[in-house]
Image (cartoon, helix red, strand yellow):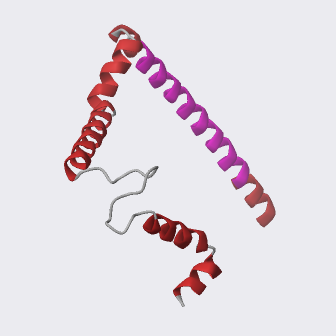
Amino acid sequence: PAPMLAAKLGWAHLSEEREAEEGATSADGHAQPGQEEEPAPAARLVNRLALCILALALLWLSSLKVAQLLTDAAVPPPALADVIGACGALRDGARTEREAHSRCAAIQADRCARDLDAAIA
């Protein structure tokens, strides 16, 4: 049943590869010429430790503090006077827009009230 299921799912080549790998060892369990052996557990441990160290280094490089340091080095911060001036300009612009909106709303409300009165009368 398992080989039939593997064939239906298109995985037959995987089981064939595994059988070929298993058949590549001799009767005494040693690999035949041309096939690599599994690395020793100590070598795998060293590889895993190296991968963990690389992952941690990449994590630290992507931290907020490192990103801030890189950004501060590449983009100089603006002067405080420029920031204060921009905030004042934004405040003045917001006031102007609020007054314009209030005038527009009042005009529309008056027009709506006149139209309603004319429709009732």
- For the point 33% across and 11% down, the residue is 80
Position of 7 with respect to 19 (left or right) is: right
Residue under the point 53% across and 73% down: 15
Image position, residue 114 (x, y; %):
74, 53
Residue 78 lies in what quarter of the image?
Answer: top left
* Residue located 65% across and 49% down the image: 109
Q: Is residue 80 above or below residue 52?
A: above
Instruction: Give the quarter of the figure containing the C terminus.
Output: bottom right
Q: Residue 111 location, x and y as percent?
A: 73, 48
- In the rendered image, residue 79, in percent from the top left (x then y), is placed at 36, 8
Outermost front residue: 27
Residue 115 located left or right of residue 3: right
- Residue 121 visible to an observer of this rendering: no
Q: Is residue 93 above or below residue 30?
A: above
Main SS of the magenta part reads helix
Residue 39 vs residue 76, the one in the foreground: 39
In this orientation, which residue lies closer to the viewer: 13 or 23?
23
Residue 89 within the magenta-colored segment of the rendering: yes
Residue under the image location 64 percent in, 81 percent down: 8
Q: Is residue 62 above or below residue 45?
A: above
Q: Count the marks.
A: 0
Residue 116 vs residue 50, the one in the foreground: 50
The quarter of the picture where the N terminus appears is: bottom right
Q: Which residues are magenta?
A: 85-112
Residue 68 pos. (x, y %): 32, 24
Question: Left of 46 or right of it: where is 109?
Answer: right
User: Is 80 part of what is drawn in magenta?
Assistant: no
